[in-house]
Image (cartoon, rainbow, N blue to C red):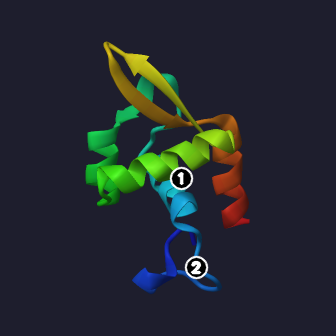
Amino acid sequence: MCSNSSTGFSRGPALPEEIHLLCTLHNIGATASEKSLTLQQISEWATMEISTLRSYLQKLTELGYVQFNKAEGVDKYHVTINGIRKVLSIYS
């Protein structure tokens, strides 16, 4: 259910791309600070350009669904509790 309708797997209206990204982060397990991923790692999993990713991650951060932390000078991102709730609400 947490997929984009362009893949043919979703029923109903397409999810916004940033919510699709949130689902991807959740599904690959980036759900705590110790499991945070870099932009490059997320880009590989989500098959998105880094510039697009930055925009979506900024929006998700503003909504409180994603949090970033700096580890050794590198920005890393993970889904917050509110982000997990958002993803789970899509499934129900």
Q: Is residue 26 visible?
A: no
Q: Earlier in the sequence, mark 1 or mark 2?
A: 2
Label 1: state its secondary structure. helix
Instruction: Say which residue label 1 marks.
Output: 22
In the picture, measured across the screen, residue 87 lies left or right of residue 31, that is right
CB atoms of marks 1 and 2 within 8 Å: no
Q: Which residue is mark 2?
A: 14
Dividing the image into 4 quarters, which one contains the C terminus?
bottom right
- Residue 1 is situated, as x and y percent measured from the top left of the image, at 57, 72
Q: Residue at x 47, y 51 (%)?
A: 55
Residue 68 in sight from this viewpoint: yes
Q: Nearer the viewer, residue 14 or 84?
A: 14
- Residue 23, position as x, y percentages in the image: 53, 56
Q: Could you say which quadrant of the image residue 81 lies in?
A: top right
Q: Are there few (<14), some (14-19), or many (20+) residues within 10 Å of tag 1?
A: many
Q: Position of residue 19 (x, y in %)?
A: 57, 60
In the figure, 25 relative to 19: above or below? above
* Residue at x 45% of width, y 55% of height: 24
Residue type of the residue flagged with mark 2 = Ala
Task: Indicate whether 49 appears above or below 69.
Answer: below
Residue 49 sits in which quadrant?
bottom left
Alpha carbon distance from label 1 to label 2: 14 Å
Q: Secondary structure at mark 2?
A: loop
Name the amino acid, label 1: Leu
Q: Nearer the viewer, residue 14 or 81?
A: 14
At x 32% / y 16%, what residue is drawn? 73
Residue 29 place in picture, x, y as percent: 45, 42
Position of 35 with respect to 11 (left or right) is left
